[in-house]
Amino acid sequence: MIEKNFRSLGKIILLPIAKALTVIGVTANMITIVGLLVNAIAAFFLATGRLVVAGILILFGGCFDAMDGVVARFSGKDESNASGALLDSVIDRYSEAVIFLGAMIYFYHLSHRLGVILVFASVIGSILVSYVRARAEGLQVECKVGLMQRPERIALLALGLLVQGFIVDVPWASNGIILVCVFAFLALTAHVTALYRLVFAFSRLNSGSSD
């Protein structure tokens, strides 16, 4: 219920902006591509250790991710059709992957093997969360259950970057410990969500229900 309320509030805030963008000819697909570029820039700053800037840019990129859907629904184009929906889904995966790549490079420069492993585990988990849902829905089973979907993962990562960036000079936090904890949590919850979705879809398919 809280998540739905936040999403509704976000749509109300974004609607006037979406209307203005639609009037000047900006499409949802354009916004999707710009969001990918913003996340790629964020990944660069993350890889080079400028964590606060990276966190802010990731949050900014998340706004584009929310905006493209609002623009699509308002204009009745792009994501309302199959091609727009496909583009948005693929670009979302690229956006998340490029951010994780930046995190792996960051931990590599710190010679933090555990950090690199946790980022890799998070990448696999996030892919499986999306894949299980897509595969289940391809079999006519709606599968949006579980924790830590993409918006939640991005929000947590951005928060972790901001906290780590602001306390980077604190001795106990200088080795990226905050981000290690963030990626440990992301990896765990992503895989739990993927497995939960698998069990959920499996049981629905076996019961013959596609509700």
Image (cartoon, grey):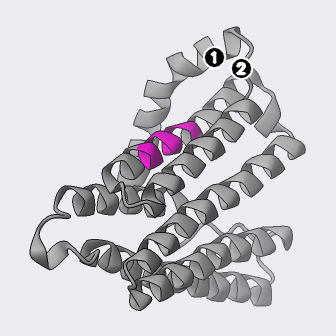
Q: Residues within 10 Å of mark 2 (few under 14, many from 20)?
A: some
For the point 82% across and 41% down, which residue is it? 84
* Mark before the other along the chain sequence, 1 or 2: 1
Q: Is residue 181 visible?
A: yes
For the point 88% across and 46% down, which residue is it? 82
Magenta residues span 57-64
Quadrant location, the N terminus: bottom left
Separation of residues labelled 1 and 2 (CA atoms): 5 Å
Callouts 1 and 2 close, C-beta under 8 Å? yes
Answer above or below: position of 65 versus 112: above
Label 1: which secondary element: helix
Q: What amino acid type should be assigned to the residue bearing mark 2?
A: Val
Q: What amino acid type should be assigned to the residue bearing mark 1?
A: Leu
Residue 133: where, in percent of width, then height?
Answer: 70, 71
Q: Quadrant of residue 46?
A: bottom left
Answer above or below: position of 139 versus 155: below
Residue 162: where, in percent of width, then height?
Answer: 28, 55
Residue 170: assigned label: none
Q: Quadrant of residue 99?
A: bottom right
Answer above or below: position of 66 versus 72: below
Residue 94: where, in percent of width, then height?
Answer: 69, 59
Label 2: which secondary element: loop
> In the rendered structure, does residue 59 fall within the stretch colored magenta?
yes
Question: How many badges with numbers are in the image?
Answer: 2
Nearer to us in this view, 120 or 84: 120
Residue 21: assigned label: 1
Q: Residues within 10 Å of mark 1 (few under 14, many from 20)?
A: some
**Dominant SS type (magenta):** helix
> In the rendered structure, does residue 125 fall within the stretch colored magenta?
no
Residue 26: assigned label: 2
Answer above or below: position of 43 versus 112: above
